[in-house]
Image (spheres, rainbow, N blue to C red):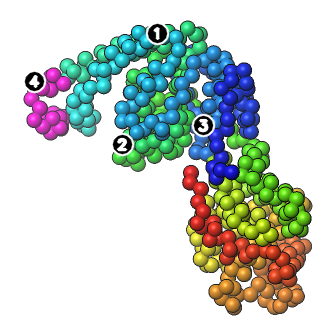
Amino acid sequence: MELRNKDVLVSEDLKANPFENDLLHREQYANVLTSILNNYKKGFVLAINNEWGTGKTTFVKMWMGYLKQKTYETIYFNAWENDFQDDVIIAILSELKKIKGDSGILFAKVLEKILPILKSTGVELFKHAMGKITGEKAVEVIAEGLGEYSVASLQKELDDFENKRATIKEFKEVLTEYVKSVDNDNPIVFIIDELDRCRPNYAVEVLEKMKHLFSVEGVVFVLSIDKIQLGHAIRGVYGSEHIDSNEYLRRFIDLEFSLPKPDVKDYTLFLTTHFGLYDYYSSKERQELREFQNDMEALIFILDLIQVSCSPTLRQLEKILGLFSVVVKSLKFNQYANPMCIIYLILLKIRNEDGYYEKLVSRRLSLQDILDKTIELFHPIHDEQKHGYFVWFQAEMVFFYWKYLTEIDKSVVLYEGNVNDESFSIKVDGKADNEYSTLKGSIQGLLSNYHARRRVNLMSYLIPHIELTKVVN
């Protein structure tokens, strides 16, 4: 069993369905995007914009397989894996070299035309100075920027710049010819993935070079991005939080598409199997122990609850279940810990909103704080069976936090009176007496049976495991 889920397998067999292992039912979106390609064959730039961890990479790889079946020439460029290469042009050219249909002669022409462009023109300082100011002070600023440049050297640089511009035009003409060498009515689809994870300078350079050098007729660029993260990179490169990154990106993107939020129940079930949790809870040996009998249902319940209330990304779900599998398997065979509480503690750690998790770990919360947080995140629950699971989960969280507190402060009490007293010190939501009674009864049952069962103290025993075990993004 691996801690991190592998990428979904996409078959290279052109006769196989590339979406065969798709658990998010996204083939319909491949159909939509392919129809757009068919209508704009001359080329454009499409951005697939979703936040990190929503399955963009898996989708574009499946879509690639789908496009290949329809005779599209496709290129996949992982920008993050290539940002060790300082020269973006070389990295992109190495991918373009892979397209079919050319004997190599045309590509040699492409290389011949790109060589002068790879050389520095030396006028960047001049361009920067011109961009800083206009009007009467322009001459002063330009003189300051040019420093020791003579009029003759400046003229030479300007001539070189004009030559470079002409060379870029020639390069794009040859590149267009090279693209047309693919004997196909469809455009080449060039997918650029993981751009928002690159070094900021590299990410911006990829965009610039894509637009100014490689944007030619017959090529559709697909950018798989998180615009928010990419916007941070853009503002970082230009050294100002006032840069309008959306306006900047409009220069490069013609069409934007976001994958709709999927129903992730199937994906969650897949992860429970992948991490061995279904086998762990469903084994005959554990099913013979009464405490384990409903735990698989309880696990699915809390995961459903989190999906509805907290909208985690697919990557966050993977992280939660990966960490959960490590923690729960650290228990001895017959030790029991409520899976709902473990999942909840991991969720609190990952989110750590307002430092809540840190306060919990350091025992700075009250019993009422513990209860109120569960209601804040997950209430209301209308299904009677699910509500039963929810009260069970609440009771265990309150009870074990009380046990956690009494390790250092014996004055902390769960009740105002004794265990059978009707005066219960924790309030529910003040609306339903039966909900109060059910929660009280569950806590009383835990208090009465705690030492007679194989339960571990969730807070004292498992928090150190959760603290030490990390799943890296």
Q: Amino acid at mark 2?
A: Tyr
Q: Amino acid at mark 4?
A: Ala
Question: Marks 4 and 3: which is nearer the front?
Answer: 3
Question: Marks 1 and 2: which is nearer the front?
Answer: 1
**Alpha carbon distance from label 4 to label 2:** 31 Å
Please determine whether, in this image, residue 90 is positioned above or below residue 330.
above
Give how far across and how far down residue 104 sits, in percent: 43, 12
Asked which secondary structure carries label 3, the reply is: helix
Q: Do callouts 1 and 3 mark residues in contact (Cβ within 8 Å)?
A: no
Give how far across and how far down residue 210 sits, in percent: 43, 27
Left or right side of 308 for 104: left
**Alpha carbon distance from label 1 to label 2:** 42 Å
| Residue drawn 39% across the image and 27% down it | 90
Give the magenta range.
138-157
Which mark identifies residue 103?
1
Left or right side of 370 for 196: left
* Residue at image mark 2: 238
Question: Marks 2 and 3: which is nearer the front?
Answer: 3
Please name the predominant secondary structure of the magenta segment in the image: helix
Number of other residues with Cα within 10 Å of mark 1, as a class: few under 14, some 14 to 19, many 20 or more: few
* Residue at image mark 3: 57
Left or right side of 349 for 420: right
